[in-house]
Image (cartoon, rainbow, N blue to C red):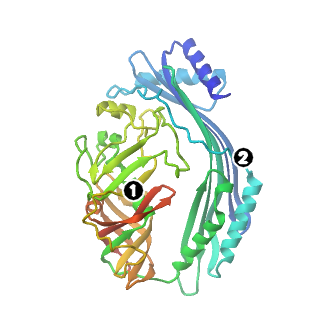
């Protein structure tokens, strides 16, 4: 069925069941993925998914929710009936409604439609990539983590008040994570990820070269002394931290009491004035952009930190009502609606007079630690407390020369980190999770093997 037919069928079934108020979000996808191990097929997947999440409001305006993959007339009626029964157990302390922006115009990015390559072609491409990466250096013995995938999907939102919207798109990804081994040395690993709207959009050769270069560079390693160091965070590492502590901007987290912010934090200076952070889900560089969220609210650019001050929170319909504002387009769809950022963009504001502009990672001759990638985010971040302790991949720079760090952990507090930024470099870089420049921190604690 096409989106209009699905909406019509749900509407008819709701009328038969005397359900006046409902909405739904639907997702349909065809997914293909492959993994290899030394040329042999390790895992091949092809799946077709269809999922509809239905919400029903009863006469007391309580919400019930259910999910189904059965799109037959019987299946939809059963799902509506179950959601109606579930509504009797709805949350009486917080009332959810339709987003007031669910009928506003949306911006759907025009992208050339891609066609599936299929499992056989994906397997052939990944085998060749694995072989080239292994052959790129004698120390690279295997590519233990790898994958090539393509996905074609459609998203729909509609409600009984007449809101209706949908979009379709494709996305492809490759990741190559190499393992290098030398005699009397510990194995070293690193990798690369590339995204595109289709496999033909991905520069696979650059993925191979980047994975090889990073892995080989880490072969010359040494331990690091436990101490406090001047820190340079790569764009990827800084975005990782900001996403890990996105509860600072999250209205749902504030209501649930698990955020460092509170309802009165808007306008508070939480960083140095040189920092701007905004969420820009519709950015042209964002492969995964979506024109609306789970409640049908249009996606938009939203300033979160402006010249160091907290300017906005991320809102769903229900949190916006509590905060007496409007939804921001960051909601999921569920019994308890979640809120999350789309795609963060970090930049230097025009309030940057106190920055140390001589700190540029490509030519600074002093001693510092360069953090390339942070790991174990879910285990090492306590977002409600603001603390983190994370293993990382990185480099120790001394007198302009760099050496890979064998193993170490960086620890600190996000409030301290944001207030102790001493430079934000001019050049911004595109990553898979957003855009950011390199960011320098006055000092953070590094725990090493010495």
Viewed as shown, does residue 375 lie left or right of 169? left
- Alpha-carbon distance for marks 2 and 1? 34 Å
Mark 1 lies on a secondary structure that is strand
**Is 362 or 138 nearer to us in this picture?**
362
Image position of 5 with respect to 109: above or below: above
Viewed as shown, does residue 124 lie left or right of 214? right
Give the image location of residue 261, x and y in percent. Answer: 27, 47
Whether residue 75 appears in this view of the structure is no
Which dot, 2 or 1, sits closer to the camera? 1
- Number of other residues with Cα within 10 Å of mark 1, as a class: few under 14, some 14 to 19, many 20 or more: many
Mark 2 lies on a secondary structure that is loop
Q: Residue at x 48, y 32 (%)?
A: 296
Whether residue 416 appears in this view of the structure is yes
**Is 79 or 178 nearer to us in this picture?**
178
Image quarter (top left, top right, bottom left or bottom right) of the N terminus:
top right
Image position of 345 with respect to 295: above or below: below
> Which residue has dot 1 on it?
346
Q: Residue at x 67, y 55 (%)?
A: 199
Residue 115, label in figure:
2
Q: Residue at x 39, y 37 (%)?
A: 328
Q: Could you tell which of marks 2 and 1 lies nearer the N-terminus?
A: 2
Give the image location of residue 284, x and y in percent. Answer: 52, 49
């Amino acid at each position: 069925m096409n989106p209009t037919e699905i909406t019509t069928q749900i509407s008819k079934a709701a009328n038969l069941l005397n359900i006046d108020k409902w909405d739904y979000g639907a997702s349909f996808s065809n997914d293909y993925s492959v993994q290899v191990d030394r040329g042999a097929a390790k895992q091949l997947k092809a799946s077709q998914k269809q999922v509809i999440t239905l919400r029903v409001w009863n006469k007391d305006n309580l919400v019930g929710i259910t999910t189904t993959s059965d799109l037959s007339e019987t299946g939809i009626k059963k799902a509506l009936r179950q959601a109606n029964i579930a509504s009797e157990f709805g949350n009486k302390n917080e009332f959810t409604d339709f987003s007031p922006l669910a009928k506003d115009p949306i911006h759907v990015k025009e992208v050339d439609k891609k066609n599936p390559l299929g499992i056989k072609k994906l397997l052939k491409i990944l085998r060749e990539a694995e072989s080239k990466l292994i052959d790129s250096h004698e120390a690279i013995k295997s590519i233990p983590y790898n994958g090539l995938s393509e996905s074609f999907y459609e998203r729909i939102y509609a409600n009984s008040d007449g809101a209706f919207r949908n979009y379709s798109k494709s996305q492809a990804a490759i990741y190559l994570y190499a393992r290098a081994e030398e005699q009397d040395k510990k194995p070293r690993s690193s990798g690369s990820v590339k995204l595109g709207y289709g496999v033909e959009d991905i520069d696979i050769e650059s993925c191979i070269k980047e994975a090889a270069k990073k892995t080989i560079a880490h072969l010359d390693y040494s331990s690091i002394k436990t101490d406090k160091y001047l820190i340079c965070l790569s764009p990827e590492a800084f975005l990782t931290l900001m996403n890990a502590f996105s509860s600072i901007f999250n209205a749902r987290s504030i209501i649930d009491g698990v955020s460092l912010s509170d309802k009165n934090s808007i306008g508070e200076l939480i960083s140095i004035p040189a920092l701007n952070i905004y969420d820009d889900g519709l950015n042209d560089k964002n492969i995964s952009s979506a024109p609306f969220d789970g409640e049908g609210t249009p996606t938009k650019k939203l300033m979160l930190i402006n010249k160091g001050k907290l300017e906005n929170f991320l809102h769903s319909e229900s949190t916006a009502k509590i905060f007496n504002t409007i939804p921001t387009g960051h909601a999921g769809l569920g019994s308890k609606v979640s809120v999350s950022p789309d795609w963060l963009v970090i930049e230097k504001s025009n309030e940057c007079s106190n920055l140390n502009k001589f700190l540029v990672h490509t030519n600074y001759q002093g001693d510092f630690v360069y953090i390339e990638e942070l790991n174990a985010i879910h285990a090492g971040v306590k977002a409600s407390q603001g603390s983190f302790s994370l293993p990382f991949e990185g480099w120790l720079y001394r007198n302009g020369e760099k050496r890979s760090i064998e193993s170490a952990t960086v620890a600190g507090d996000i409030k301290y980190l944001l207030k102790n930024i001493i430079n934000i470099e001019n050049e911004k870089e595109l990553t898979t999770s957003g855009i950011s420049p390199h960011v320098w921190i006055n000092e953070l604690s590094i725990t090493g093997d010495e």
